[in-house]
Image: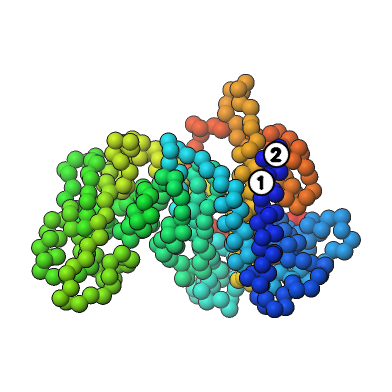
Amino acid sequence: MNQIKRIKSTLNKCIKTVCQSPREYCRNPEKDFTRRKKLPMGKVIKTVLGFSSKSLNNEIIDAFSGDTKIPSASAFVQQRSKILSSAFEDIFKQFINRINAVKLFEGYRLLAVDGSDIHTPVISDDPDSYFKQGDSKAYSLYHLNALYDLCSHTYLDAVVQKRRNANEHRALCDMVDRYVSSIPSIFIADRGYESYNNLAHIQQIGQFFLFRIKDSYSNGILRGFDLPDEDIFDLPISLSLTNKQSKLTKSLCKDRNRFRYNPSNSTFDFLPSKSKHSDPPSFFQLHFRLVRLEVIPGKFEVLITNLPTDSFPPVKLKYLYSLRWGIETSFRSLKYTIGLLFFHSKKPEHILQEIFAKLTIYNFTELIAASISIRNATRKLIYRINFSAAVNVCRKFFLGFCTPDFVEAVIQKNILPIRSLKGRPRLLHSKPAVSFLYRVA
């Protein structure tokens, strides 16, 4: 129970820290929130963090429950428009950094990197997010790039881009460069992040990577190496990359497992972009293993990693990569349980506010749920929390409408069995943002 109080207190302190520096987070620093008003900055931020799937009027009624001086939707929007989205981004980052909920897998922190499209209300005057072809229905998309801790089930970092300008590779490099930790960490990613530049950024901060890459028959990293004839192999590579073409580099690159020419149209941040003809070639050393393994009979996948061979044989790499699915299920919870499809404004700045607010509440819920023990000793199956019920009660707790005792009782009572042998095919179909007119009461 003390842990539940500490988590809420930490989030409130992060909000207070942002509110103490309004000049950094307001659109007009000289005027905004300089006078005492019915809607101070802190109350506006807490209300946005507490948004669920209701209409804006009903969200305000919930947030100001019991207060006779409830503001109108118009007044709330005016106050909200004064706050930059960077305030919510900083609250999200400060909160997870202050909590420092680190869980390890055999001494390593497991970090999944992935992206997901977010349907927002249609914004026809924003060409970077607006899509329409012919007579098809128009829609708007943002792209969320996230760094997710697979053991503690929390988001550590995020980069939000408008879909037409989305660049997952650059977002990954930005998040990797910002990541500071003395704990050995493994960045796990799918084939969309296959790039020497991405691997080099992770190597440069002294951490580890585990990426799935395309097989040898595709135009990926694996193509161009002299590989063993066997279907399954574990090949160590020490590769020298250069972007300079000369007689020397051309002769060196004939040894395809030791040297590689990186063309100028391929991004690589650790080699000079320009050099004189007389300058000697620059090389960047990249060390990794190419591991081809059998996933199911007759189906093979290739992983690239710089993890040590003795501690991480192919069997363990296969298991580690399977854990990456945790970020996919977190996106589902973020959209459908937390409510990232239910926006309360069409303004781009407000959309960014709500994205980082939902990420914060996701972390808030996961941290509280992790602090509550579920007794499995006398049960036939292993049980987990009902995340939907946990989100509901944690949101009420954050807004101050229930006690830590009530939160603990609700989460312990609402649990679901884990049936590991059950499965079903993955059905892919997108769902748009929910219209402002179709909200629950």
SS of the residue at dot 1?
A: helix
The amino acid pointed to by label 2 is: Asn
Q: How many angstroms separate mark 2 from mark 1 (CA)?
A: 9 Å
Q: Residue furthest top?
A: 378
In front: 392, or 246? 246
**Residue 47 at x, y percent in the picture:** 73, 60
Number of other residues with Cα within 10 Å of mark 1, as a class: few under 14, some 14 to 19, many 20 or more: many
| Residue 332 visible in the picture | no
Q: In the displayed structure, would residue 280 be above or below residue 192?
A: below
Q: Which mark is residue 287?
A: none
| Screen quadrant of the C terminus | bottom right
Q: Which mark is residue 7?
A: 1
**Residue 416 at x, y percent in the picture:** 62, 34
Location of residue 247 by image quarter? bottom left
Earlier in the chain: of badge 2 and badge 1, it is: 2
SS of the residue at dot 2?
A: helix
